Image (spheres, grey):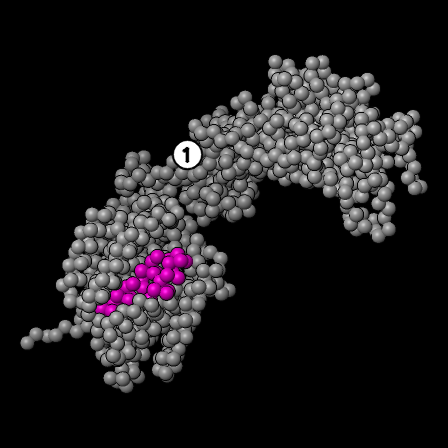
Amino acid sequence: MYKKFTISDYIGYIIAFIFLILFIFVFKLQIIESNKYKNIAEKNIVRIQTIYPTRGEIYDRKYRPIALNKPSYNLYITPGRIADKDSVSIFVSNNFDIHIEEIKKIIHENRYRSYQDILLIQDINYEKMVIISEQLNYYPSLLFKAEKVREYHFENHFTGYTGRITEKEYNTLKEDGYSINSTVGKTGLEKYYEDILRGENGQQVLQVDASGNNLEFFKHNLQVAPKNGDDLILTIDNDLQAYVSSIFPKNKKGSIVVMDIETGGILAYISKPDFDPNLFTGGISTKDWNELISNTDKPMLDRVIHGTYPPGSVYKPIMATLGLDEHEIDPKTKLAKCDGGMWFGNRYFKCWLEKGHGRLAVENAMKYSCDVFFYDLSTRFSLEQLNRYTKQNYLSTRTEIDLPGERRGFFPSRKWYIDNYGKYVGILGHKVNLSIGQGEILVTPLQICAYYAALGNNGVWKQPHLLEKRIEAEHTFKNVFEEKQLPISEETLKLIQHSLYITVNERYGTGTASSIRGIDVYGKTGSAENHMGKQTHSWFSGYALCDRFEIAFNVFVENGGHGGAVSAPLAGKLISYYDGIMK
Amino acid sequence: MKKFEWIIFGLLIFLLFIGIFSIYTASSTRTGDNFIFTNYYIKQFFWVLISMFVLFLLLKAPNAIVEISIFPIYIFTILLLILVLFLPEINGSHRWISLGPINFQPSELAKLFTIMALSKLISKPFLNDGQILFRSFVITIIPVVLILLEPDLGTSLTFFVILFSILLVSDLPKFYLVLIISPILSILFSFSIWIFIAYALLLIYILYRSNLDKVLIGFAVAINTFIFFITPIFWNSLKDYQQNRLLTFINPMRDPFGAGYQIIQSKIAIGSGGIFGKGFLMGTQKNMNFLPEHHTDFIFSVIGEEFGFFGCAFILLIYFLFLYKIAKSIIKIKRKEYRYVSVGILAYITFQIFINIGMNLGIVPTTGIPLPFISYGGSNLLINVTAIGLILKYLNERSIFA
């Protein structure tokens, strides 16, 4: 007789077998191999190290530098190695421009990141690094790392700048591989193209003993190489950019944009006054920051896309086009007589020329920029028509340039007036004013530039952009941007173009200061009254064609005076300079 | 209460207190001479109290109430598993339902009630083999598919262990188990046509010799052939990261910075504990935060580091005594359904212990399976204690149904 095995017996054996396996492996780890693991644990040598990618650089259209990486020495602290929090804080604070309490705060915030290196000071110069390195024996928690920081080659508004990640940014970005020491694009292209510029982290497991020997404990290939960020090639021309920046009147505010008509690529982009983005490298000092934000000229404001202004007479081509294409006027129609102004209801609307222009047809009204013609024209359209038509010409709507935070601009509607002025507001007077780009209408200089570029490009509106292409290792990617059609008929376009031409190239035209021999310059002046100062905003926008290049431009000087007198000559200079470098 | 299994109950209580004690040290951090404690161990203590309360309710509850609640709760659980797929992701998967401070995994509940529903359905008298197979398949596949969608590969595997263990002790001829295992093997072998052909020939031979119904054999061959063709298609339709995730599941070292890193760190912690360990609260690997999930999935490595070989061996011994005692008493449960339930519970708890400790020792893939009765985690603890409570209840009442 033998004992019959029951289910319980079988299950018992299976369980015993399973626990035997576990026991054997526990025995193996803790008895047989224990010394090996004790070694590793004591020296605390196995650690993940993130290898950060190199940020992509930014170049102009001819591959000349705009924003590059330069080597820099950065000081880090490892919270787990701090012997005495006070003494190390005092040491750092004595040697660098940082308050002792700020260091203590950083240490406190990172007290659980015992064995991570926390960035303390960026961009330390070599001499200082050498001097301090000699004292680091006393402070094992401090270490220098040779890394890279951004260097911008000229003052500008479009590159933006990078900065150390904030706690709040870190919390939203940590999933994407950012660390507490990461640098992120804060404004401008650095922010807009952050994903492209940044690249991807790599990682490696470090397994060295105290004297730096590889223990070869894990015989796996424990490294993932980082993928560096792509370089950006911009449409900017550094020469033109520098020249335009140099001719802008000193002590004036404003902007100049130059754009390639065919592509929408921006050749020059300045906003004055400007600031040096290098100030932000390694963290801006409190003094510099206060200076920047307390300056009443607002150097941080990018006037090209963040400033909105009444366009004044540069708006007039839109009115003229509307009148012609809706057949309210034909090319020969003469409207109300200008004797220095005209009455509407009980209000007298002045023309900019006190002695008056007489009765004009549309081309001459454009050439002389006669306000009365457009006042009269505006009475034939409803406010909603103007609103819609303005938007259809891509004013009061974002151009979607590749920069963050672009402003939309504004064109009022009936509802807006009623909401703001009450039910019985007289729309007519406002409408008359809007017809010459005055009143509540607000545009960005970039919108105007894009509009004039489209006039020069047979009515094809190109999305303005700064990125020409990006370079990933050996691959080049050209970016594709949008193009749209302006609502304008062919005959009307011809007429508008002609009127812009005579404005510059015929005697007594308002824009003659920009005319250049050998190049066909088209343009329109604007002198917009505004509440910011006594002087009008000075506008001049248009385009220049020749067999070597086709560019559109917008020159805007805040409270600069008359467009024809202030902005038009600047346009002339920049065109002939560009002509010079294109020869 | 004469027949109450005090030894099993006593070992359970002992394990629970080992758990609280381990969580106390595992969730502490040492900085210099100071210790920082979290309140996880206090929370765990309250969960132990709640679990005890539920356990006593269960023991006192009339059997009829437990009986009639099985299918409604099973269906309710399936609905929860569907619901959880539509809730926001937590840590990259749809496993948890958040109820205020408590995160609850419906798949925990699903395990227990799948066991009960399955046992009830296939222990009915006069079932033929086909009926048993069909019922097991339907009851198990629904939660498995839903849990795979979460995705939670580890937990879905648990269901196969449950199904397999219950069918093993059922009246079903053992040949049928080949039918259950063969599709899984087919999936693995379908990546190489030659291995698959060899495997298919072997399978056909076994089936041929098994005297099974010809229709069933045909069915088995059809299923396996179908899987052979569908697996590569399914595999190629997966996105790269999904393929990677599966490959990493099988071989964590593919991902030395994720799953592999944890295993490296866990092995260092346990191995460096040596014979006697580094002492209570003194684990260095733990303190350096090298190890993730100290107080949940990797609590065994903290025990191993601080209490060494003796600590680990002691834990293994207590677990073994506990499970062995249950295994030995299962023979005393005469009613088929209850026996199936007990075997299912015993199998999945043993499986979880094996997978978790095996993961800590670096011998099985990393899955999010906690260590039963010891890891921190409210809903998991509650379900495990309730499951043991069920076995205790069946043992307690065995005379009535004998």
Q: Nearer the viewer, residue B175 or A23?
A: B175
Q: Residue at x 59, y 23 (%)?
A: A237
The relative height of residue A207 versus residue B289 in the rendered view (above or below) is above
Where's the C terminus of chain B, which quadrant?
A: bottom left
Q: Which residue is mark 1?
A: A137
Q: Is residue A86 left or right of residue A568?
A: left
Residue B221 lies, in percent from the top left, at 23, 59
Which range is magenta? B140-168
Q: Main secondary structure of the magenta part?
A: helix
Q: Is residue A532 left or right of residue A546?
A: right
Q: Is residue A131 left or right of residue A210?
A: right
Kind of residue sitting beneath label 1: Asn
B146 within the magenta span: yes
Q: Residue at x 24, y 51 (%)?
A: B189
Residue A409 in sight from this viewpoint: no
Where's the N terminus of chain B, which quadrant?
A: bottom left
Residue B217 lies, in percent from the top left, at 21, 63
Q: Residue at x 44, y 29 (%)?
A: A475
Q: Nearer the viewer, residue A477 or A381?
A: A381
Q: Nearer the viewer, residue A232 or B19?
A: A232
Determine which quarter of the picture holds residue B72: bottom left
- Element class at badge 1: helix
The relative height of residue B37 versus residue A314 in the rendered view (above or below) is below
Residue B99 lies, in percent from the top left, at 49, 65
Residue A114 lies, in percent from the top left, at 43, 46
Residue A33 in sight from this viewpoint: yes
Question: Which residue is farthest right?
Answer: A346
Question: Which residue is farthest left?
Answer: A1
A55 within the magenta span: no
Q: Chain of mark 1?
A: A
